[in-house]
Amino acid sequence: MPKGIDAGDTAWLLASTALVLLMTPGLALFYGGMVRAKSTLNMIMMSLVSVALVTVAWLAAGYSLAFGPDLGGLGLLGGLQHAGLKGITPATPHGHVPALLFVTFQLTFAILTTALISGAIADRAKFSAWMVFVPVWALVVYAPIAHWVWGGGWIADLGALDYAGGLVVEIASGASGLAMALVLGPRIGFRKEAMRPHNLPMVLLGVGLLWFGWFGFNAGSALAANGTAAAVFLNTLAAGCTGLLGWLLVEQRRDGRPTTFGAASGVVAGLVAITPSCGSVNVLGALAVGLVAGVVCSYAVGWKHKLGYDDSLDVVGVHLVGGIIGTLLIGLLAVRSMTGGASGLLTGGGAVQLGKQAVAVPVVGLFAFTVTFAVGKLIDKLMGFRVSAEEETNGVDLALHAETAYEHGVHGHANPLAKLAGNSGVPYVPPTTASAET
């Protein structure tokens, strides 16, 4: 064991890294069940290809830009001293864990954050354009924000708190999702047709994997197997539960019945909000954070219909809004026993911490939105970012991947692959009633 590296901390971070990586396949299932059947595979592919593309970008330059020595002492970006992981060996420590493990742990955050954006442009984005967007976004949006908050940049110097990614992950992805929804424009039939999730069991499986992985996401950010990690673990569980309950309470009062889709969305809202605050609040604070997020986000997802932006899978309503809630509530509910210093307005610390959080939130959101909008517009101009109307209507699975998620086509129609394969002259024989029911 290299000097300074703790075996227990290393073992916990290895497990946490695997948990966070699992969140991206979980997101793929979550998003894949939320879209219409004709877009299922494309939605899953947008998440899975992010694993490969962000990994290459992160190892080449992303990690160094985020966590390398500050460039020029401005607190804006890391230098390229660690490009290609130069100077980092298996024996190099980062605190009490191997530096290579820290690199990998942070990589899984970058992967998931980038993949989250795909939910805002579901059903209508070119896969080729997405493949260009992913590594560029990871380098020019994610890496700078990560440096500001976690890499010793200006937000860290300011003293604003973000334990596991309210600014870096949730607000960055949510604001970027809004930008991309505006770049691509609304789906055909938006605000006119019902675009319901086609597979709710898949959605629930996805949210279960996300919740499971979120323990690595938050508690792993302690970078140690200690009491802080245990407290963060409990806070994560508590907020997910009250997020679920808060969303269902709104549904019961507003619509007269709670739904499985609402339960899944409430869990995610609670987990999103506790992500920045899990290391700053006690368990009572965590319960409050989750409940507020579940209630507010359940209303926020409807804003797109009033304001006219088509955020397909509610990245804005859940991740942007939930991230803002969790980040600001640190300024109200933070306790010294968790932070080691700062306290919130309602816990005897005055308004100082709230002011710091209130500065960081809009700056990160505006930066992510502006740069993402510019990147999206540039890619759209160079190669087009949106599929044709015909491809969108027929389904992006078939148009972009020559596949469909279900063997007998969509909603009982003939298998569209037959035409693609040149067999359109062969009549399609539907399954018997018995086999269809089976």
Image: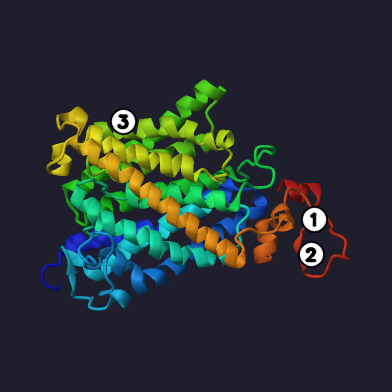
Amino acid at the residue labelled 2: Ala
Task: Name the amino acid type tagged 1.
Answer: Ala
The residue closer to the viewer here, 75 or 36, is: 75
Left or right: 217, with 304 as reference point: left
**Image coordinates for residue 72, horizontal then vertical, percent:** 22, 66
**Residue 51 can be seen, yes or no:** no
Residue placed under numbered mark 2 in the picture: 418
Secondary structure under the numbered disc 1 in the rendered image: loop
Mark number for residue 414?
A: 1
Which class describes the residues within 10 Å of circle 2: few (<14), some (14-19), or many (20+)? some
| Crowding at mark 3 (Cα within 10 Å: few <14, some 14-19, many 20+) | many
Determine which residue is flagged by label 3. Answer: 288
Vertically, is 312 above or below 395?
A: above
* Residue 292: quadrant of the picture: top left
First in sequence: mark 1 or mark 3? 3
Q: What distance separates the C-alpha of mark 1 from that of mark 2? A: 8 Å
Q: From what the image shows, is residue 52 above or below residue 161?
A: below
Q: Determine the CA span between mark 3 and mark 2.
A: 54 Å
Work out whether residue 226 can be spotted: yes
**Residue density around tag 1, few if under 14, some if 14–19, many if 20 or more, within 10 Å:** some
> Which quadrant of the view contains residue 307?
top right
Instruction: Say which of marks 1 and 3 sits in front.
Output: 3
Residue 164 x/y as whole percent:
29, 50
